Image (cartoon, grey):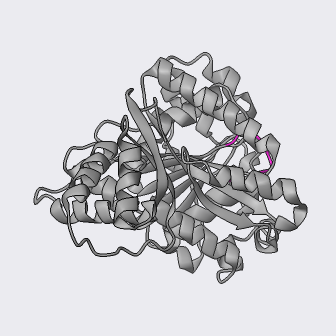
Amino acid sequence: MSIPTPRGDREKLITSLTPQLRRHLKIRAFEHGMDIQDATEHAIKAWYLAVDVPEVDTAKAKTWGTFLPAGEPETFKGACTERGVTYVQGLAQAVTLWLENHPSPTAPLTAQPVTRVIVANQKGGVGKTFISSGIAQALAEDGRRVLLVDYDPQGHLTAELGFEDVMYEDDVETLLMHMEGSAKGDIRDLLVALDHKRFGERLHLLPASDDAFLRDVSLSKVSFSEAALERALEPLEDDYDVIIIDGPPSLGLNMDTALYYVRRREGELADRSGVITPVWANRASHRAFRLLKSQMDDLCRKGRIQVDYLGLVVNAYDSRRGKLVKENKDQWERSTSPTVLAVIGDLKEGREAADGEIPLLEYAPDSDHAQAMRDLAKELAV
C-alpha cells in the first residue's frame, strides 16, 4: 500500500498474483515510466482483445489488490466468467501478456538508492527483532550487503546477536549523537560484523546504545528532526544493498524519523523500500496496526511524502489456540493493503537462537523458521 491513497474515481479489484509476477510488473512499469496501477489497467484492456491466451502457473499466488477505473473491476470479472477462467488466472494472463509486449528498454534502469526497510509495530512482543534479524541474515546469506540498525532503545537485537556489551561501552559515540550532529567521528566506527562464514562478512550491525531512551526528547530540539536518521546513515548507504531497521515499540518522533527514512525517494521503484509490520493473530495487533497506520498517514500528509507498506507478517501463529486466533489470522489474510507476506508458526528455533545469542540461520539453517526468513527475503530482492 502506498500512502497517500490512490486518486479518485477508481474502484478496487481484489484478487491474487504470484510474488514473481508482482515484482516483474513493478520493475517493468517503472522502466516504462508507468505507475503499477496504470500498467495493470493497460494489461487487462489488452487481455480483453487477445485470443488463445495460454494458461499461466498461479501456484503460490497471494492476495493482491489494485485500483482500476470505476466499473472496470466488474467488467474484468465478467470477462473472466465468459472465458471460463478464475479471476486469479485472468489477471495472471493479462500481466504476463503485458510483460511480453513491453520488454525491458535497452536503456539501463535508473540507479536505485539503497533498499531501506523498517520492521515496525508500536506493540511490543510481536517479533520485530526476530523478523528484522532473520530477513537480514537471509539477504546476507544470499550475497547482499546488509546493515542491521537496532533502533529499539531496549536493545534486544543487539543482545540476541551477542553484542550486549557494546551497548554500555564508555566514551563511545552513539547513533543519537550522529543524529543530533554532535558526533565528531565516523559512524562506521560504531558498526560490528557478524563473522559467521555463511554471511561472508556482508552482515553488519549498528548496535543500540543506552542513550536511545532519550531520543524523542533530544530530537525535539533538532532542526528538521524527521530527517535526522537519514542524515546519520547517509554516509553508510553506498556500502550496503539493504538497510533494515528494527523499529521501536512506540510511536512519536523516534518512529517518525524512521518512517521518513524509508519513504519512497524521487525516482525509486514503488514497494522497494518501506514498512513491514509483524502482527499476532489477536485483536490487540489489529488495534496497534491502526495506530501505526494513523501515524504514517499523518506523517505522509504533513510531509507530502509517500511511504510504501511492503506487507504484514503474521508471527507465532498456532491454530491450536482456538477459533478466535484462526479468525484473526483469516482477517489479516483478507487484507490487500497491505498484504500478508507470510504466516510463521510458533516454533522453538527462533527462541532458542535468541536465548543462545546465535543468529537463527547459523543455529538452525534447515528449520522452518529459517526457510520462512529466506522466503521473506525474496520479497525484497528486486
* Position of residue 36 in the picture relative to residue 177 (left or right): left
Residue 357's x, y, as percent?
76, 67
At 81% from the left and 71% from the top, the residue drawn is 356
Residue 122 within the magenta-colored segment of the rendering? yes
The quadrant holding residue 353 is bottom right
* Position of residue 196 in the picture relative to residue 159 (left or right): left
The quadrant holding residue 254 is top right
Out of 35 and 175, give the one closest to the viewer: 35
Is residue 78 at all visible to an observer of this figure? Answer: yes
The quadrant holding residue 327 is bottom right
At 62% from the left and 27% from the top, the residue drawn is 295
Out of 79 and 17, give the one closest to the viewer: 79
Residue 331's x, y, as percent?
70, 50
Out of 279 and 220, give the one closest to the viewer: 279
Residues drawn in magenta: 121-128
At 67% from the left and 63% from the top, the residue drawn is 343
Residue 74 within the magenta-colored segment of the rendering? no
Magenta portion: prevailing SS class: loop
